[in-house]
Image (cartoon, rainbow, N blue to C red):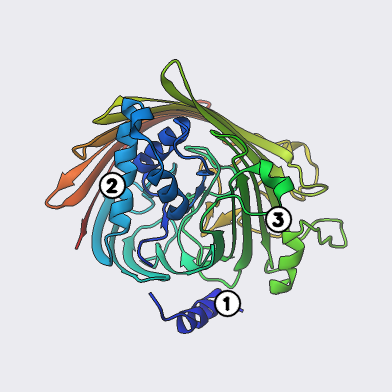
Amino acid sequence: MKLSHIAASCSLVFAANVFAEPWIGTDDPFLRAAIEQLVSEGAIKRPVNSYPLMWQGIAQDLSMINRNKLSDDGIFALRKVQHALKAAKSGSYSSVKVSGNSEPSNLQSFGERNKHKGNIQGTSVLMGDRVTAKVSIGYSKDATSQKELNYDGSYLAVLYGNWSVSVEQINKWFGPSNDNALLLSNNADPMPGLRLSRLNTDYYGPSFLSFIGPWNFSAFVGQDKYLKNDDKDTLFWAMRFSSTPITGLEVGVNQTAQFDSPDTDHGFGALSDVILTKNKLDNNGVNEYNQLTSIDIKYSTRLFNQSIALYGEYAGTNELSFLPEDTMYTLGAEHFFGGQDFLVKSYIEYTDTISNCRYIATLSHCQYQHPYYEQGYAHLGENIAASIGQNVKGLSLSSSYQTTNGYAGFVKLRHMDFEKLDTKRLQLEVGFQQGLFDGLLKLKAATWRDKLANDSDTEFALSGSWEYRF
């Protein structure tokens, strides 16, 4: 059954309208920085490293913050998040966004996607008591997905009890990484699918398990598509459970799987297998499901009147147990400082996706590769997880700056060693945004140098966007 049929059915069942957009998306790293700063202050006491991030628990913590106990940069962060919450509650709206890039970006971090040479996107959001509907239609030129017409960002979300059920085509991000989430990121175009998420992450359950603290759960099943509609579509499953056992500490467990490949006939009947991490072996002993798992951790605190955080993710294939095999990892550290009218976030992040697959005589299943899935762990030709891909070592240094008057910017330096291509890349990115003509203008420039075995090449790219809401 195609997921588009499910979407149509759900839209007929639910005809009511929620007071706010129910979640925070993956396109605003400045809002994420403010939320992370409040976690380091102990002002937000719940999991925040799964996007879309539900507003309800965040709003609850904001209402209980004692401003007198916050640092100056904590006061800025509080104002930033409160302003974003007010905007989310402002009611139905529409927007138009135009964007262009001299070269589509092949490296994607948490934030706005730039995977096309040109795009115009029209969006309309309708809100009511228990339902939010967002329709977003765009036309792209030279997109990496090879799509001209897209519905990226569209969803129909229904709140039922403490749960949100949504039919959607939106990006997701699992874990604390800033540049390379190892299981699920916004690198590829969003898949159409169905998602179930907890609305408020307050602890609920038996008293003997209360030590896990506030907890979050999100599960998604979607349609994984190939470039050029050639009937090779597969199904995709993703799940994240995270908790905050002590203030500032978040621990997460993630699971994903591709199934129902063109060479098999699994259908939705295999969903129970991948949820339970069961294998389905063919006659050669190869698991027909492409299953991956990861564990991540982040600790945020104040030290010497400075907000800091340490984080990591450990990921790999899931064959013999729930623990990752053929592993890859990300490690990072963050630092925040500022005043009541500005905030600076800086981070260093190292990712290693070097695999031992090259030592395997007959490749079966290793990290992002799988013989049953021709394009690998990808959607429309792009990796579903880390944008650097497999067999790469990447190091990022970045600093971002935002102010109360709407100005914001960042600078980022990356170094990547593409082992398989015998290429090393050094890349510098700078970005800036401010209000313009009652809209938001964003500009970015990037230059990079690829050093090959016997040659080198230097490139330069510019990108920009302007969005107007009404």
Give the Cα separation between the discs numbered 2 and 3: 42 Å
At mark 3, the secondary structure is strand
* Amino acid type, mark 1: Lys
Relative to 300, residue 22 above or below: below
Label 1, residues with CA under 10 Å away: few <14, some 14-19, many ≥20 = few
Q: Position of residue 214 (x, y in %)?
A: 58, 46
Q: Which residue is mark 2?
A: 83
Label 3, residues with CA under 10 Å away: few <14, some 14-19, many ≥20 = many
Q: Is residue 150 left or right of residue 275?
A: left
Q: Position of residue 63 (x, y in %)?
A: 38, 46
Of labels 2 and 3, the one closer to you: 2
* Along the viewing direction, whichever of 338 and 101 lies nearer the viewer: 338
* Along the viewing direction, whichever of 206 and 12 lies nearer the viewer: 206
First in sequence: mark 3 or mark 1? 1
Q: Residue at x 51, y 63 (%)?
A: 191
Q: Position of residue 410 (x, y in %)?
A: 32, 32
Q: Residue at x 28, y 64 (%)?
A: 91
Give the Cα separation between the discs numbered 2 and 1: 39 Å
Q: Quadrant of residue 426?
A: top left
Q: Mark 3 and 1 residues: CB-CB less than 8 Å, in contact?
A: no
Relative to 253, residue 149 above or below: below
Q: Residue at x 79, y 49 (%)?
A: 319
At mark 1, the secondary structure is loop
Q: Which residue is mark 3?
A: 290
